Image (tube, grey):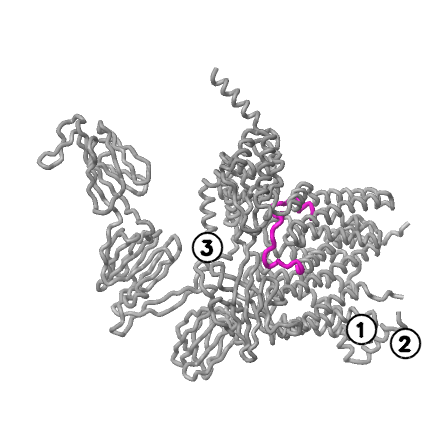
Amino acid sequence: MTVAPPAPLNRREMIAERCRRSVAWRIIHTLGSLKLALLLLATIALACAIATFYESRFDAKVAQTYIYKAPWFLLWLGVLCVNLFAVTLTRWPWERKHLGFIITHYGIITLLIGAVIGSQFGFEGNVLLRKDQPPTDRLVTSRSVVQIQNLATEAFEVFPFDAAAIRPSEKRPRTFPIPDSTWQLVIDDSAPHLTPDDRLVPSADPAAPAGLALRFSSGMMAQDLTLPLLAGDPASRERDFFGLARLRLLDALPTRLPLKLTESHLILARYAPIVQGEPGATTGVTATLSPDGRTLEVTPPDGRPTALALPATLGRPQTLGGNTTVTPLEFWPDFTLVNGQPATASQSPNNPAVLLRVESPRLPAPGQDRQPTLEIALDGDRLAYQLLRGPHLVSRGTAAPGEPIRLGWADWIATPTAILPHAGIEPNLQPATPAQGGPPGFRAHLRGPDGQTTPPRWIASGDRADLRSPGPDIRLSYGLESRRVDFTLALTDFNVPRFEGTDTPADFIASVRFHDPATGRTRDDTARMNTPASWPGGWLAVTTGLNYKFSQAQWNPENLDETTLQVLFDPGWLLKWTGSLAICAGIFIMFYLRPKKS
Amino acid sequence: MRPLALLLLLLLATATLPARALNVGPLETMPVQEGGRKKPYLVFAQENLIGLAGRTSIPLDGRRQPATEVITTLWLTPEGTENQPLILVENLPLKRALRLDVTRKWFSRQELSTNLPFLALVERAAAIRRANRDVRLTGLEKSADEVAARLARFDRLRSGEAFRIVANPAGSEAPWSVLPPDDPALTALRTAFQRGDFPAFQAAARTLRDTLAAQSPAYQPPAWKIALEAAYTHVHPFRWAWILYLAAGLTLALTSLRGRAPGYRIAWILAGLGLTFQLAGFVARILIASRPPVANMYESVIWVAFGAMVFAFIFEAIYRPRYFLLAATFAAILPLVLADSQPAALDASIQPLTPILRSNFWLATHVLIITLSYAAFLLALAVAHIALGKIILGRTPTAALYNYIYRTLQVGVLLLAIGTILGAIWANYSWGRFWDWDPKETWALVALLAYLFILHGRIAGTWGGFGLALGAVLAFQTIIMAWYGVNFVLGVGLHSYGFGSGGFSYAVTFVIVEVLFCAAAVIRHRQLRGRPSPQPA
């Protein structure tokens, strides 16, 4: 060991002495105290632990908003930095044995400064690339913003706001000032999913088409929703009903063939049967009568024969497979025609015959749609409807507003709520269940200086809506902020190799072409799992973090021509990794390379 | 007379059925393509029976049948297997909901596929998943979904489509196919199997295996790999490891704690042998999978036991206090026995890496180092148990013993810090951000902070050796959370490839026992402090 500098008396006494003399040293020793360090370690650990349970219970955004990225937590990390810095000063003058200690503690400070720089000047986001798309210079950040534009003055302002994280409520609304106005935007509810809930509104325009609002309710599904239909353009005439059925508003109901096909068969034991039915259609049912006329054997098109005893089953409908119903109507032991009418010549089974009615649902043609449809035509203040399965009629009827229509789709019931001669559709949204899906969003209204308010309206992420008020009219946009960069990128190829003999992806390989329009430089790179693509690239950019890094983030199993890349631009990277290195090296020096006490 | 003759014939027929466990012989080393790799038939059978029944052998027809026999029966003579109780239904609430006999573990395909409440639950689970692909099922739906997956596996086996044994001449990565049902080699095998003719069966199996191997020799997996995996499966090196550790620990506890005796040397040798078995097991897994053996919970549990043992050997070599070896044998036995006895929760199968882990460099650095830190903390926990145990027994641990805990914690803290930071750097490349409070990251940090808290309190003099020992036990609960809890309890975040379920009651019991143990130690410590310390003789 080197010769220690002439130590003033004793280290401990010297430190006590300087604290007595100077307030500054006293403050430094308080700020750098181990007691404060213990408090910081315990509280930060506890807060982080609680946050993970928050995240499990709610989601990552909530944990970030209330803990990890909350001002108090960041402030607490600031106090940690002060503590770390002060504690190194308390060891002044430094000796060789302090080397590891100082490196470690400064390493943590460096890392935290790097993190601050990264979050302030860096950029995290993603970009969706498609092979057939032209090069793009737009990246989507992970920051949600609200943009409010005053339509009169065109002044606009952007505020960071994430409804899913902040979760505004009527108790805790968020307000934003409207530029060039004394009015405010009030956000007082949020929803993880919003689904379209368009409304039928009367129109003053005499050219506007007639409209119909139908309320659909199902006790089984615990659902109640209203759908509007307009007799105008084809798009508003037809609606899909959850993929379950179709709704169609028509000027007049077309004639449809009934779903039930009815045939009458005269079956003779000794001769071929005589079948009467609809031309060009058949139920496919065949029947034979035993020579004694006591047993009728009926065979549906794809089922097993069923034997019916005669005359016991006369007049009784019998259900066979495939929803086919047969009813033996009449029986003649000794069939003959008297004056053109069927009759029996005797009671002995000389020529037994039976008249059979066959009812069967129409067989769908191969590839034919079996989806149910509700067809409606308006007729003054009433409506006429017919229910179809595939192209065939199941039932028909009329209804006035308030009169329910049994649809026969599970337990769904449709009730017309309004029939308007001239109507329009107002786009609207409403909160939905996770099963229904849809983008997240919030509910907003405008509030004037005197407390007057406009009707509330749901706004979805990625949406733009115009809100009108007696005061200003505004245009409100909500969604992830996008950012333009000074280079372009395009996806030239995307490959998903699979594990042998399976469909499980083994890797994701995106070939990306970067281009700088200013310098004309072009660079091809590939982003695969664990190896990102980067721009501008090169060791200097990579080590300093002044580099855009593109890592594989998401893929679409249905479309292998597109991929989503995560983008990172992190100017704090240099400090982060040097700080990290210092922490590890410092701990090692502290634990294992300390000079032995003499 | 005729009925009697029939009965005799029937008796004769049953007598020729395989009465003892079937040895499938050469079939064991026939490669099968499944789950993204090629594995020996032996491993294929065991993994599939674990997938069906949760075990590598099950009681059937009044005797214990090994996986090879059960799976071969499904393949060659599937008639009637739909009535065999082969499918594990474990979850008690599910059994109650399905009105199944709660005392039974296994049920037949027939019983399940005609159980209307079960079908309704499976349909509901499917509906939930259709609505949201990423949703995590819970409760009955989750358990029913697991059983449905077993049923699907049963059907794949029963229909023969799982037995992909014919190499594809299109390339080494191309999907393999099944044998046509009328293949002569297969027919010979089936006939011999039906007759219960062992020699004929073995001969047919050899013919089948060799015929298949000769078809596309270029695309067959290397024979040594298949042989190695079959041998690894037969030997159970990790089971031998814990048996040897147990022997070492018992030897040490019974003999050498009373002074340096041959017992200490024997314990060294036994533990060394155990470590050799474990090392051999790792080498085998590395060679089979071509990657570091830390890709799932099972592997990390085994690796932690290994790490604890290695650290103990190093410390024991430096300090020779016996405590490390004693502590480590028991610290290693616990995870090894757990891994050996819970094949359903801790999946021992070797699987290809998920894309996100596909980097041997980062897997070997970040994951190995993090799990090594767990190993050091596990060793510290075990040494702390000796110290606290002494206190509970009314004796005062030496300062040296406390120092051993401190030394072990240092190793853990250094490795955890390095491992966590390496993880952040890997995340910077793989996920495109350095640190974003993912639950796994956060819990690694919480654990690090907890141990730093204990070390700093010791430096500050807020607590001494006893506090350190107490801290080594209590802070380990954060490791349990970071290691097991994030994957199995929280179940959120980006480390989802490691998620699983099961063992929750074990984990909670462990935590409660540890906390009670600490409480007992604290009470005893207070009592001892109040008493004048006895002078050592």
Query: Which residue is at the front of the view, A154 or A429?
Result: A154
**Residue A80 x %, y %:** 69, 71
Which contiguous range is marked in magenta?
Answer: B334-362
Query: Which residue is at the front of the view, B58 or A134?
Result: A134
Q: Which mark is residue A15?
A: none
Q: How crowded is mark 1: few (under 14 residues within 10 Å), some or many (20 or more)?
A: some
**Residue A232 x %, y %:** 28, 68
Task: Give how far apart the Cα atoms at labels 2 and 3 are.
Answer: 78 Å
Q: How crowded is mark 3: few (under 14 residues within 10 Å), some or many (20 or more)?
A: few
Tell me the subunit letter for badge 2: A
Which quadrant holds residue A323? top left
SS at badge 1: loop
The residue where tag 3 is placed is B130
Q: What residue type is labelled 2?
A: Pro
Determine whether, in the image, residue B236 is placed left or right of residue A132: right
Task: Give how far apart the Cα atoms at labels 2 and 1 are.
Answer: 17 Å
Tell me the subunit letter for badge 1: A
The residue where tag 1 is placed is A91
- Can residue A66 be seen at all in this image of the molecule? no
Task: Give how far apart the Cα atoms at labels 3 and 1 are.
Answer: 62 Å
Q: What residue type is labelled 1?
A: Arg
Split into 4 quadrants, where in the image is the C terminus of chain A? bottom right
Q: Which mark is residue A6?
A: 2
x 42%, y 69%: residue: A458
**Residue B460 x %, y %:** 78, 66
Q: Which amino acid does label 3 sit on?
A: Arg
Split into 4 quadrants, where in the image is the N terminus of chain A? bottom right
